[in-house]
Amino acid sequence: MTFVCQVDPDGAWDEFVTRDPGATFCHLAAWRAIMTDVLRNECLYLAALDSGGEWQGVLPLVRVRAPLLGHYLVSMPFLNAGGPVGTLSARVALADAAVAEGRRSGADLVELRARDAVPGDVRLSQRKITVALPLPETADALWGSFSSKLKSQIRRPQKAGFETRFGPEHRDAFYAVFARNMRALGTPVLPADLFESIALRLADHVVFGVVYAGADPVAAGCGFVWRDGFELTWAASLREHSAAAPNMLLYWSFMSHLIERGVRRFDFGRCTPGGGTHRFKQQWGGADVPLPWAQWTSRNVTAPPTPDRPVFRAAAACWRRLPLVLTNAIGPIIARRLP
């Protein structure tokens, strides 16, 4: 028999996550402090136990409420994984517990962002996919697999004198590029202290990389190493430098840097199938990987608030015209309430 209880994620939680083959960096206990202290969201960390009290599975669940936007239970907000992991019976029990909490609290949507199909009384969402590329043992081998067109696009910013640097000391430069790019997209930017907290609490996993034109950051990324894989969770480049293609150098630099660290799988992060971002990621030679997120809703809600909704398109057009100092001040207040 399997039962589910709420726990405080600690060493026992991370010990389970570390040994479970289906777990990801999104399951680490550190995210609870990040979600509560920075984003002010309620966290329900659920563990499935057998009759002997042994842990069989875990599920980090985060409640996100926003006036006018809705009430959501998500694992995990802003991330691409975090759904139930463990034995089959544990994952069933955890999914059922999440649905039960959704019913009890009147949530508009429960979304379990899993890497594998979630069993139980949930429906499958196929609105997002990722692209994954196996990495060879050397950067030279990866370079040799690229088309001549791709190599030419990477060489362009190199010839212009751009260079990439890695390390936590480049976090502020990453955020400067990220914030300007989000305004250009018409989307509220995540708070800077989110990345400060990530750098502090997930120092062994997070990687910040920035492409510089002289002293100026022009493209940047932030992602996470987990076991022998890496996911580039956030990436951005400045449109005024697009002719020099710094984003191409950014991705190549991340791949070659990670190969040196022994990483063997590069995950490009989630995207919408068939969109421009999807096509950009496909050109590197990776394969599409479905993200079988599981959902439950009592109100026929298919997704949390996204910029694709018509009501947000007009707002996005206005947002792009606001001064950067204003969007950087207001954006994080809004983004904290988005899952």
Image (spheres, helix red, strand yellow):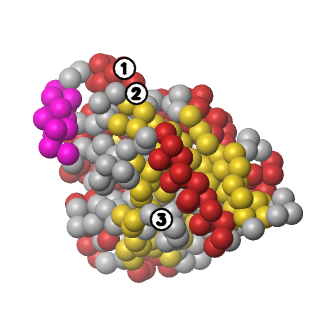
Confirm whether residue 215 shows in the render.
Answer: no
In the image, residue 9 sits, relative to residue 279, either above or below, namely above
User: Where residue 222 appears, x then y in whole percent?
Assistant: 49, 47
* Residue 329: mark: 1
Left or right: 96 as drawn, with respect to 110:
right
* Residue 164: mark: none
* Residue 332: mark: 2
Which residue is labeled 3 in the image? 121
Q: Distance from label 1 to label 2 (Cα)?
A: 7 Å
Judging depth in this view, the residue of 194 and 339 nearest the camera is 339
Name the amino acid, label 2: Pro
Mark 3 Cα within 10 Å, few/some/many (few <14, many 20+)? few
Question: Going 42% across and 56% down the picture, which residue do you hit?
Answer: 296
User: Where residue 48 appears, x then y in whole percent?
Assistant: 71, 59
In the image, residue 145 sits, relative to residue 167, either above or below, namely below
Callout in the foreground (1, 3) = 3
Is the C-beta separation of discs 1 and 2 under 8 Å?
Answer: yes
**Which comes before the other along the chain, label 1 or label 3?**
3
Question: Going 48% across and 29% down the picture, which residue do you hit?
Answer: 192
Judging depth in this view, the residue of 16 and 260 nearest the camera is 16
Task: Identify the element where label 1 is drawn.
Answer: helix
Is the C-beta separation of discs 3 and 2 under 8 Å?
Answer: no
Q: Distance from label 3 to label 2 (Cα)?
A: 34 Å
Name the amino acid, label 1: Ala
**Which comes before the other along the chain, label 3 or label 2?**
3
Q: Which residues are magenta?
A: 309-321
Task: Identify the element where label 2 is drawn.
Answer: helix
Name the amino acid, label 3: Asp
Q: Main secondary structure of the magenta part?
A: helix
Q: Distance from label 1 to label 3 (Cα)?
A: 41 Å
Callout in the foreground (3, 2) = 3
Question: Going 26% across and 72% down the picture, which residue do you hit?
Answer: 149
